C-alpha cells in the first residue's frame, strides 16, 4: 500500500494507533514497533475511536502493524501493581465489583467488535507475531493476508486467563471447536502454512509483497456495488445461526431488495 504519509488523509494518530483514509479505503496502523505493537487500554480506546471516526464513504478497512510484528499482545505492564500511568491496573480491576469489572472488559471488547460491521469489509495484513490480543485483533477482521513469518498464538491460558477480546467466536467459526480448543489450551504457535490450510489465513504471500497483495484484495472488493457486498456479508454472517430453510428465506428477502433497488423501486 502507499505510505500513509503521502496521499492518505490523517484522521487519528494517538496512543499507538493511526487512522488514515483515502477515498473508500481506510488504513488503521499500530504504531509502536519498538514494543512489537503491544496493546494497552489506551490503545483499545484509540481503536474504538478509529471505528467511530470512519467517514461514511469508507468500504474497506485495512489493519496493519508497523515493524516486524503485527502485535505481540497485551503489554505485560498491565499485570504489574502500578499498571499504566493514569489507568487502573488489572489487579485493581480485579478488586472491583462484578459490575465494574464486567463494564471494563466490555469497554475493551468494543475495540475488537466494530471490524465486523456489515457495511465494511476489513482486512488484517499480518506479519511476525500475532499473539494473544494481537491474534484476537487479527481475528476481528473479516479477512487475513499473512506473511510467511507469521506466528498466531493464543497465550492467555498460560497466564491463567481466557481469550476475552471477542476472539473465541471467530476462531471457532474458522477452524472448528476441537482445533480452536487445542490452539487456545496449548498456547502453541500456528505458522503460515497451517494458518492457510485450516482457514485462519485467506492468503500467504512473501513479506515484500504483503502490502501490494492487500491493496489488490481491497481493489477487488471495491469492484462490486456496495449494497450487494453489504447484503452478501450479512447473509454469510448469519448463516451459522439459521437453519437451511431459514437461510433460503433470508436469501430470497435479500435478493428481492437488490432486484427492487436495481429496478429503481427501492426506498
Image: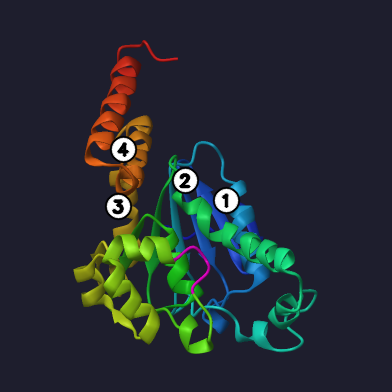
Q: Identify the residue at image location x=38%, y=82%.
A: 185
Residue 229 is marked as none
Out of 235 and 123, give the one closest to the viewer. 235
**Residue at mark 4:** 232
Relative to 25, say whether 165 is above or below. below
Q: Residue furthest right?
A: 86
Q: Position of residue 44 (x, y in %)?
A: 62, 65
For this view, does 244 lie left or right of residue 52?
A: left
**Residue at mark 3:** 217
Q: CA distance from mark 3 to mark 2?
A: 18 Å
Instruction: Give the magenta-colored segment's residue range.
Output: 163-167
Residue 51 is marked as 1
Q: Say which label, 3 or 4, has the lower sequence index.
A: 3
Mark 3 nearby-residue class (10 Å; few <14, some 14–19, many ≥20): some
* Number of dots carrying numbers: 4
Nearest to the eye among marks 3 and 4: give it: 4
**Residue at mark 2:** 117
Q: CA distance from mark 1 to mark 3?
A: 21 Å
Membership of 245 in magenta stretch:
no
Q: CA distance from mark 1 to mark 2?
A: 10 Å
Q: State the SS at label 1.
A: helix
Quadrant where the C terminus lies?
Answer: top left
Quadrant where the N terminus lies?
Answer: bottom left
Amino acid at each position: 500500500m502507499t505510505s500513509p504519509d503521502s496521499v492518505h488523509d490523517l484522521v487519528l494518530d494517538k496512543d499507538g494507533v493511526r487512522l488514515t483514509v483515502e477515498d473508500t479505503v481506510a488504513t488503521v496502523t499500530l504504531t509502536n514497533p519498538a514494543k512489537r505493537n503491544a496493546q494497552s487500554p489506551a490503545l483499545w480506546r484509540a481503536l474504538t475511536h478509529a471505528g467511530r471516526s470512519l467517514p461514511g464513504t469508507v468500504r474497506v478497512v485495512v489493519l496493519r502493524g508497523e515493524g516486524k510484528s503485527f502485535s505481540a499482545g497485551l503489554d505485560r505492564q498491565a499485570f504489574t501493581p502500578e499498571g499504566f500511568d493514569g489507568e487502573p491496573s488489572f489487579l485493581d480491576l480485579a478488586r472491583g465489583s462484578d459490575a465494574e469489572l464486567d463494564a471494563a472488559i466490555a469497554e475493551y471488547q468494543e475495540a475488537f467488535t466494530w471490524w465486523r460491521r456489515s457495511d465494511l469489509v476489513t482486512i488484517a495484513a499480518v506479519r511476525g507475531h500475532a499473539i494473544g490480543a494481537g491474534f484476537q485483533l487479527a481475528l476481528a477482521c473479516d479477512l487475513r493476508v499473512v506473511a510467511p513469518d507469521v506466528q498466531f498464538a493464543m497465550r492467555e491460558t498460560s497466564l491463567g486467563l481466557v481469550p476475552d477480546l471477542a476472539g473465541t467466536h471467530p476462531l471457532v467459526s474458522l477452524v472448528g471447536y476441537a482445533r480452536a480448543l487445542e490452539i487456545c489450551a496449548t498456547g502453541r504457535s500456528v505458522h503460515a502454512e497451517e494458518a492457510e490450510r485450516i482457514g485462519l489465513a485467506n492468503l500467504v504471500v512473501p513479506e515484500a509483497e504483503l502490502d501490494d497483495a492487500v491493496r489488490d484484495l481491497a481493489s477487488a472488493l471495491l469492484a462490486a456495488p456496495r449494497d450487494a457486498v453489504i447484503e452478501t456479508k450479512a447473509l454469510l454472517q448469519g448463516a451459522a445461526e439459521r437453519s437451511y430453510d431459514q437461510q433460503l428465506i433470508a436469501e430470497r428477502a435479500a435478493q428481492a431488495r437488490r432486484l427492487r433497488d436495481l429496478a429503481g423501486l427501492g426506498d
